[in-house]
Amino acid sequence: MAAAAKNITEYKNYVDFIDKSKENLPGVFIYSSLDSFEFDLIVDHCKIILSQKGEKLEVVVYVSEPGDFENFFSEIFNLSIFSSQKLVIIKSGIDFFKSVLTAGKKGIYDTFKKNIPSLSEKSYILIHYNTNSSPPEKLLSLFGNKCSLLKNRNYYPNERKAALEGILRNEKVTIDPSGIDEFIHRIHPNTGSYIKNIRKLKTFLNKKHFEHNDITEILFNAADFNPYQLVDSLFLNDRVEFFKEFSKLKPTYDNAFQLLKALTVILVKVDEIRKFKLLTKRSVDNNSDEFYSLLDMKSYSDKRKNFTKGRLRKEANYFADKVLEMLYDSLIQMNIKFKTGMSEKSKHYYFIQKMENIFLLISQRS
């Protein structure tokens, strides 16, 4: 992508795009991600920006049907100086551009690319390139220096606090420090999840500032399955709470995501304890940057750092290395099994069977 990258503007994240596009909306914008929710937010933002110009706005949507690319070609290159503003939205970008990016369509590709410099300043193109991978260089080159790009991904641990704070500013709300810690710890780390949950708080509570209790009561309903509660009770060897949480899982055909999330949370927990034990053996200062970086705790508040260190110290003393290794191997096998061709119902019962075995393993401890 090196050659194409020189000619495009790439935004760091959703908030970066929102801030910069208020003054300068790109002519061609490619959003590369499977997250359709965030793309819809971007579409709404662009509609607002263009509507504020005081001119009529025409919105055209393509969803990758036969003949759509030819219609799109005609749509954007046949505007008169008297035409209204036009916002062209392309969904399922992979399928939409597949034909023109193949070797046999070089003529269409070259003609389109040749005409792009003459794209009217009143035309704006939003493309949802529905993949978590980078768009191909050939697609970026098709739009030349008119192209801007946002590649969505999960936030790294050291990015989460700043990302959340940026979204909170954009949503014009605040969360207290303890609530921010809880939010970061328990919400899936991407823009779409952060915005969905912040807007859920705004809708349910109708206020501008949220406390820790608001986060737990609204976002983590006690009646819903909570993988974090399951993991906490598992590692505390609390049989009553463990099976109470476990009973909330029903053999439905749509809970595979919940099961996989629970597996991921347990894996992260085991890995965290293993790292803590290793750092302790190496006599690494538990207030050093190295310590916090290796345990993904740099973004935590001081209060949460102290709480987490105390909990890890207790768990590290509680579990022998042998038990942790056996547990880690078992979880890896479950993770692999889950990603094979099992039916959703089979996954549910397989998960129950294996989790009961894991609970017994943890109960042994040594």
Image (spheres, rainbow, N blue to C red):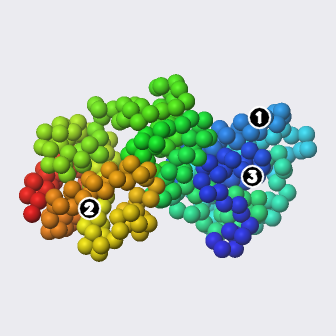
The residue under the point 30% across, 70% down is 279
The residue under the point 37% across, 35% down is 216
The residue under the point 38% across, 32% down is 213
State the quadrant of the N terminus. Answer: bottom right
Q: Nearer the viewer, mark 3 or mark 2?
A: 2
Please indicate, yes or no, whether residue 62 appears anywhere in the rendered image: no
Amino acid type, mark 3 = Pro
According to the picture, the residue beneath numbered tag 1 turns out to be: 51
Q: Disc 3 to disc 2, how far (Cα)?
A: 46 Å
Amino acid type, mark 1 = Ser
State the residue in front, 282 or 271.
282
State the residue in front, 172 or 190.
172
The residue under the point 49% across, 38% down is 175
Other residues around mark 1 within 10 Å, as few (<14) / some (14–19) / many (≥20): some
Above-or-below relation of 58 to 126: above
Q: Secondary structure at mark 3?
A: loop
